[in-house]
Image (cartoon, rainbow, N blue to C red):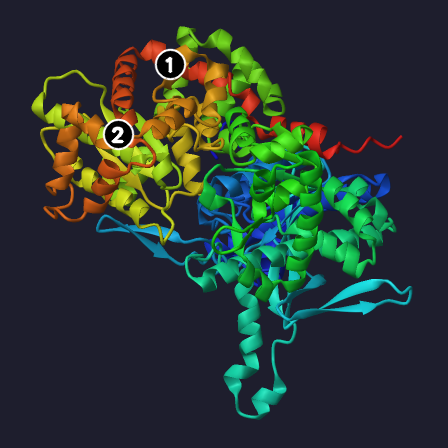
Amino acid sequence: MQDATPTPATDPDFQNDVVRNLICRQARYPDIATPQDWYMALAFTVKDRMLESWAASTKTYAEHHVKVACYLSAEFLIGPQLGCNLLSLGLEDEARAAMRALGQDLDALLALEEEPGLGNGGLGRLAACYLDSLATLEIPAIGYGIRYEFGIFDQDIVDGWQVERTDKWLKMGTPWEIVRPDVSFYVCFGGYTQMQTDAQDRLRVQWIPARQVKGVAYDVPIQGYRVDTCNLLRLWKSEAVESFDFEDFNAGDYYQAVEEKVVSETLSKVLYPNDEPDVGKRLRLAQQYFFVSCSLQDMLRLMDISHTPVAHFAERLAVQLNDTHPSIAVAELMRLLVDERQMAWDDAWSITLNTFAYTNHTLLPEALETWGLPLMQNLLPRLLEIIYEINRRFLEEVRNAFPGDEARVVRMSLIDEQGEKKVRMAHLASVGSHAVNGVAALHSELLRQTVLRDFADMYPKRFLNVTNGVTPRRFLMLSNPGLASLLDETLGAGWRSDLTRLEALSDYADDIAFQQDWRAIRLNNKAALAGRISQLVGVRIAPEMMFDIQVKRIHEYKRQHLNALYMICLYRRLVRHPDQQAAPRCFIFGGKAAPGYWMAKLMIRLITGIAEVVNRDPVIGGRMKVVFYPDFNVKNGHLIYPAADLSEQISTAGKEASGTGNMKFMMNGALTIGTLDGANVEIRQQVGGDNFFVFGMTAQQVEALKRTGYRPGDYVQVNDELRDAIDQIAAGRFSRGDKALFAPLLDNLLNYDPFLVLADYADYAACQERVSEAWQDQRHWTQMSVLNCARSGIFSSDRAIGEYCQHIWQTQKPAPRL
């Protein structure tokens, strides 16, 4: 954030509250306080004001008997909180003046905040955007997830390789959470079940667990933008039921005495353990069940304290499953209703079906989770019995709807009988939800046509689309204050609450004076990023260069190696033809590879290897630079998104469900080079084909090529530049002479190429030439940049949440009291 107005007068109440919190909560007085102490004191002061809003919101919800949207997600990548909360409360200037009066710099304090390690990538960031929009639209809502003690990892680049460091985001504590020891629940694991007859002579099942874990609630307030509504993100921490065994201790077995505590707390220790080994699979399933069970038990608690009969559960609570991870909730709610609340099966199933809705985020088979029956039987025996019964009844329904079609029955079964028998969790979610949505128009259509086709045939009215969105609060107002101020001056402040008003910006796209202001703001943003890159990796970049940026999870389907091949070709061309006209360009990458994903790590090493060669070549000079920006996260995104000229969205068509980075870049005025994949299709529709650089095969062409037999080597033989690039890699040019280093990557490309990198290369390279030509005309480029921002309104998460409320949840803002 930065000063945009004269310094306001200091509010003595705000300033006094900061000092009070410094003394009473941090146990420091100003003369000895560290910057971290001041940050905590300021954050507590802001949170106090949020909690006043939270109390009023909760009281309103209770008085109106509202329907609450409950968002179940294994990730919530909420990002640093102080800046966003100051923005939402309208306290930026007040806080800046108060801290200045106390001898502190607000920007320095903002930089101290650790990013909460509660998510990995787009899935968790989307969940955080949705919580922001729910609060801003004043929709009663609770987010439910896990309070991971350690995030996925912090990333260093050492000698060109990704190195993972433990993400100790809680090492200094966090001021934003409220511990709720009174809100805790027991979660069962292992053991066996036994049948018994109740007092009414009805057969009941009792789960006798081998062990229990206690889940304790930690709440994070989520403040709406310039409204009085504040909702909650409720995260569960695992604890031992009994954390110390005196018998073991007295017997001298000190380790055994605390073993239960250590084992139980493992559930909320780390985000997404490596699930390759069996122990990793077991922990991941246990994590999912743990947070789902705690969350559903909490919802039943809320029903009880509001004196609402459980029969009205679906009328008071709408539960969204954010991807397949929480899908065990379908079976768990049935268990809670049938076993714990003594409901008849049919009544419980009606409640369950009308409560849940399922968002699918991927077409990749490996992300459609399955769990082996032995693992499920060992860890969750009662849940497996319930899944069997759901499946038995469901398959009867399938046979009635499609008599004689046993092949369909096999495909749709919740149990995969092929090879090792497994529970298909996406099938469970589809059967147990009244709505199933994809997250972009193309993705939703492919979902109906491919992985969930049978379910769409059987339940066509359940399937719909809600294209993803991102919050403009964080990704425009907070991260790009210069542009936000220009928009205020040009359009008025109304766009801040209704992003569709940006459409009026189209009228200024060709205005010379406006373009000058636009370019000045962009140049300032690029200079800030260039300065940070120089500090981090020692590469000096001229802000006037085109910033060509690809930041996202490192994965073969996202095709960072397609970009890398083009960089090599461009570099070789510039070396051979020093006088060739080409746009001076800095390629900037960022993203993390999963620790066990060797090919993705090798892709990072290739990029850093190219950077070593290009950045040190005096022949190239200032015409080309390559940077890998380490540890990409939300906080770093604040610098990166506003500085991009070109946004790389180059996944294989049909593989990216939606994407949200593409929307953040567009919102800040970047142009997109991309395939017709995910939300790229809708972005291009909004901004127009003349303002979007499209290349590559369509999803239909991709599938057709695979059916007819794809031979990647053929594409290399007819493309001299591409063949030369591959030869350079094989010769060790970008691996310090090590010819074996990239052999696995080249073998994969030349003999398999599962994501058709080589098939799309020629069209991608030709498209990049069109980009270079367009950059030469800065007036026209600026016009396209303005139009991208102007047409981004539809990609606000406010729009997406409005669609969920209207079409899936049937929730709304409480009516004002008369």
Q: Position of residue 398 (x, y in %)?
A: 67, 39
Q: How many marks overall? A: 2
To which residue does mark 1 refer? 782
466 lies above or below 381: above
To which residue does mark 2 refer? 758
The single residue placed furthest to the bottom in the displayed view is 251
The amino acid pointed to by label 2 is: Leu
Q: Looking at the rendering, which quadrant does residue 624 occupy?
A: top left
Can residue 295 be seen by looking at this rendering? no
Q: Nearer the viewer, mark 1 or mark 2?
A: 2
Left or right of 381? Residue 751 is: left
Residue drawn at 53 percent across, 17 percent down? 489
Dot 2 falls on a residue whose secondary structure is: helix
Left or right of 417? Residue 801 is: right
Q: Position of residue 760 (x, y in %)?
A: 30, 25
**Counting other residues with Cα less than 10 Å from the Cα at mark 2, is it few (<14), some (14-19), or many (20 or more)?**
many
Say which of 339 and 221 sits in front: 339
**Quick one: label 1 or label 2, which is nearer the N terminus?**
2
Left or right of 770? Residue 224 is: right
The single residue placed furthest to the right in the displayed view is 200
Alpha-carbon span between mark 1 and mark 2: 32 Å
724 lies above or below 247: above
Residue drawn at 63 percent across, 44 percent down? 429
430 lies above or below 813: below
Q: Looking at the rendering, which quadrant does residue 204 occupy?
A: bottom right
Dot 1 falls on a residue whose secondary structure is: helix
The amino acid pointed to by label 1 is: Thr
Say which of 596 and 227 sits in front: 596
Residue drawn at 27 percent across, 39 percent down? 534
